[in-house]
Image (cartoon, grey):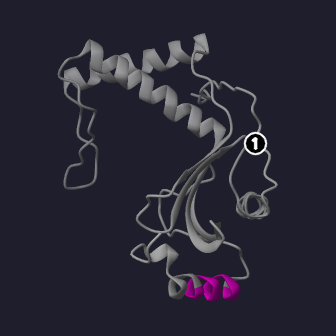
Amino acid sequence: MSTMNPGFDPKEISKLKQELKASGKSFQLFPEEENSDEFVNFYFIGMFEGKEVIYDAALYTLRLHHASEVYELAEHEAAKKFPNFSGIRYEEDENGNLLPLTSEEEEIGWFITEMIMEIEEEESVKVQEFIDIDTNHDYGIGLDAALNVEYIDEKVIAKFIKEFNDDTIKLDETMYTFQSEEEDV
């Protein structure tokens, strides 16, 4: 790997090490609004081919991974049924209120909802814990992982990094399926 990728640059790694030491943590969260209790994006330092590197990691719950896979499949089915479908886009007015969907978008939305319910009921999408490494990432090495945990917090992140760096992580190979949680009306 060349030093063209800043995540391999010893100066960048040293800078992140100092920031991690100052924070007392083994990771640095992205200050993104997308981070939640089911998805977290962060940097950490690990080894790759005998050298230190910065990992650009996305860690999410298996439940969120499942929901994403189900939604993607439902959208695929919508694209087959509605030739003009290219996604539903929500737009806001000048006050930040959502504008109404067109009747076609609304019909597609209901179709997708029905497909999600059908896919979940049939349990046709099954997922398992995984770690994917992307060595062609623009900053360090990309890492995507899904774990069968209820939520992602600092303790889960720190445990993941320790086990990943110690090469002791054991992924659950069980295939799981989830149901959407119904909201109380």
**Vertical comparison of 14 with 74: above or below:** below
Residue 149 coordinates in the image, percent (x, y): 74, 44
Q: Is residue 15 magenta?
A: yes
Residue 88 coordinates in the image, percent (x, y): 28, 33
Q: Nearer the viewer, residue 160 or 60?
A: 160
Q: Is residue 137 magenta?
A: no
Q: Quadrant of the C terminus?
A: top right
**Residue found 27% across the figure and 41% down from its top:** 90
> What amino acid type is highlighted by mark number 1?
Leu
Q: Nearer the viewer, residue 47 or 81?
A: 47
Q: Residues within 10 Å of mark 1 (few under 14, many from 20)?
A: few
Residue 72 coordinates in the image, percent (x, y): 43, 29
Q: Quadrant of residue 63?
A: top right
Q: Quadrant of residue 36?
A: bottom right
Magenta span: 14-22
**Residue found 61% across the figure and 85% down from its top:** 19
- Residue 8 located left or right of residue 176: left
Q: Main secondary structure of the magenta part?
A: helix
Q: Which residue is the site of mark 1?
A: 171
- Residue 94 located left or right of residue 78: left
In the structure shown, which secondary structural element does the residue marked by tag 1 occupy?
Answer: loop
- Residue 43 located left or right of residue 128: left
Q: Quadrant of residue 109?
A: top left
